Image (cartoon, rainbow, N blue to C red):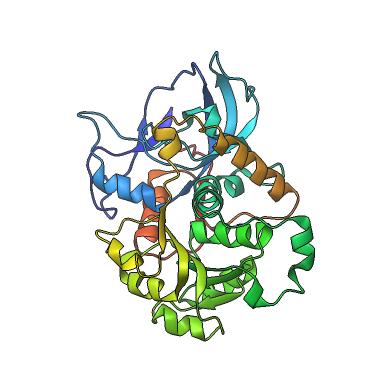
């Protein structure tokens, strides 16, 4: 089968950093389903792994953690899916990735694909959606609004609603997080962005305010008329903004992060009794946790919300066929921070 892989950890401007290859088609067993990959999207984790994780001696490493496709075979213990089902998923960091024509994935971390979306539109969602959902509702435990709350929301003053600041909100995780907050909570949503197109993007997704993260966050926050906030989700550059984040949070507030700061002074959180929450969406699959199937339920619930028109895909850049050349371009866009929303590729080139 066709795939895209690497043997050496090379810079993305090197043609050998990602190569078109041919490898054996895997066989489904146990709780695995075999998916014919129709479309993929690209995330920062892809280029981080490509730069740091060595391939096995004499072999190619195949990465990629977002896909949509069709189930072509199932293991003997599979109960959630049948051959022919259209699915979407982020996969497992410890297994071969989605940059291949066919991929094995545990059924418990796979969802039914939204009926209203194309394969590329669906492929944009899983990793970022799981990350955003788990961060908001599992880690930070942002209150979910009831239907009665939603009816009262328009009459409420800003001061009586929870407030959340999302740092780096125009990226893939921030784009779906903003929508989840708008749809499932009463929170006042403050996103950060610096480019005009990113600011416009966030406002279309439902952000109440957009502030510039190139300026001190506390100064920017004051411009909104909000002095302190209940929650901060830091999606990138946490070290750079850490002191300002602490300044912005109310006493007993909560900070969630997903990036990889080299060091954080945890003692700085003590005076306000602030709590720190990490989100890593691969934790359940890496450690085969008893609640691993929650990601299956989560993706199914999101699919229902999308088909009902409550959420929309976060595709912003479409790079055509799944080829090494196009995938290198996608990695480069992410490394250079040239993208907002998600980058997707769909279909396998006939010339391979």
Residue 210 in which image quadrant:
bottom right
Residue 196: percent from left, percent from top = 51, 78
Left or right of 181 in this view: 168: left
Instruction: Using the image as rendered, state which of residue 196 and residue 10 is in the foreground.
Output: 196
Residue drawn at 34 percent across, 59 percent down: 335
Instruction: Using the image as rendered, state which of residue 88 and residue 325 is in the foreground.
Output: 88
Q: Residue furthest left?
A: 57
Q: Residue furthest top?
A: 76
Q: Quadrant of the C terminus?
A: top left
Instruction: Report the number of discs.
Output: 0
Instruction: Using the image as rendered, state which of residue 205 and residue 167 is in the foreground.
Output: 167
Residue 136: percent from left, percent from top = 54, 55
Q: Is residue 85 above or below residue 297?
A: above
Residue 52: percent from left, percent from top = 25, 46
Residue drawn at 65 percent across, 39 percent down: 300
Left or right of 256 in this view: 133: right
Residue drawn at 25 percent across, 60 percent down: 263
Q: Is residue 313 above or below residue 349?
A: below
Residue 139: percent from left, percent from top = 49, 51
Left or right of 134 in this view: 117: right
Q: Is residue 319 visible?
A: no
Residue drawn at 52 percent across, 40 percent down: 67
């Amino acid at each position: 089968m066709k795939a895209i892989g690497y043997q050496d950890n090379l810079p993305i401007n090197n043609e050998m950093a990602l190569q078109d290859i041919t490898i054996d088609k895997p066989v489904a067993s146990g709780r695995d389903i075999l998916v014919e990959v129709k479309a993929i999207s690209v995330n920062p984790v892809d280029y981080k792994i490509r730069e740091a994780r060595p391939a096995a001696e004499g072999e190619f490493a195949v990465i990629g953690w977002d896909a949509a496709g069709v189930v072509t075979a199932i293991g003997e213990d599979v109960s959630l899916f049948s051959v022919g089902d259209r699915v979407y998923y982020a996969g497992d960091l410890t297994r071969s990735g989605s940059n291949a024509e066919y991929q094995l994935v545990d059924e418990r971390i796979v969802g039914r694909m939204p009926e209203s979306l194309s394969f590329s539109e669906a492929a944009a969602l899983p990793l970022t959606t799981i990350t955003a959902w788990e961060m908001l509702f599992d880690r930070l435990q942002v209150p979910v609004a009831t239907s009665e709350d939603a009816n009262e929301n328009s009459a409420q003053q800003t001061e009586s609603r929870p407030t959340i600041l999302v740092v780096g909100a125009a990226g893939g995780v921030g784009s779906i997080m903003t929508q989840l907050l708008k749809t499932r909570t009463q929170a006042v949503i403050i996103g950060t962005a610096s480019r005009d197109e990113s600011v416009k993007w966030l406002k279309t997704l439902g952000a109440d305010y957009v502030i510039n993260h190139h300026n001190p966050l506390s100064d920017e926050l004051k411009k909104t008329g909000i002095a302190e906030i209940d929650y901060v989700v830091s999606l990138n550059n946490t070290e750079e903004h850490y002191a300002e984040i602490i300044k912005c949070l109310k006493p007993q507030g909560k900070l969630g992060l997903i990036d990889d700061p080299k060091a954080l002074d945890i003692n700085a959180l003590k005076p306000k009794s602030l709590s720190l929450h990490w989100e890593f969406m691969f934790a359940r699959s890496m450690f085969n946790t008893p609640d691993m199937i929650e990601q299956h339920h989560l993706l199914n619930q999101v699919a229902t919300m999308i088909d009902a028109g409550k959420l929309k895909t976060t595709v912003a850049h479409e790079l055509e066929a799944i080829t090494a050349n196009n995938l290198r371009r996608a990695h480069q866009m992410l490394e250079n921070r040239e993208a907002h929303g998600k980058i997707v590729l769909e279909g396998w080139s006939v010339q391979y």
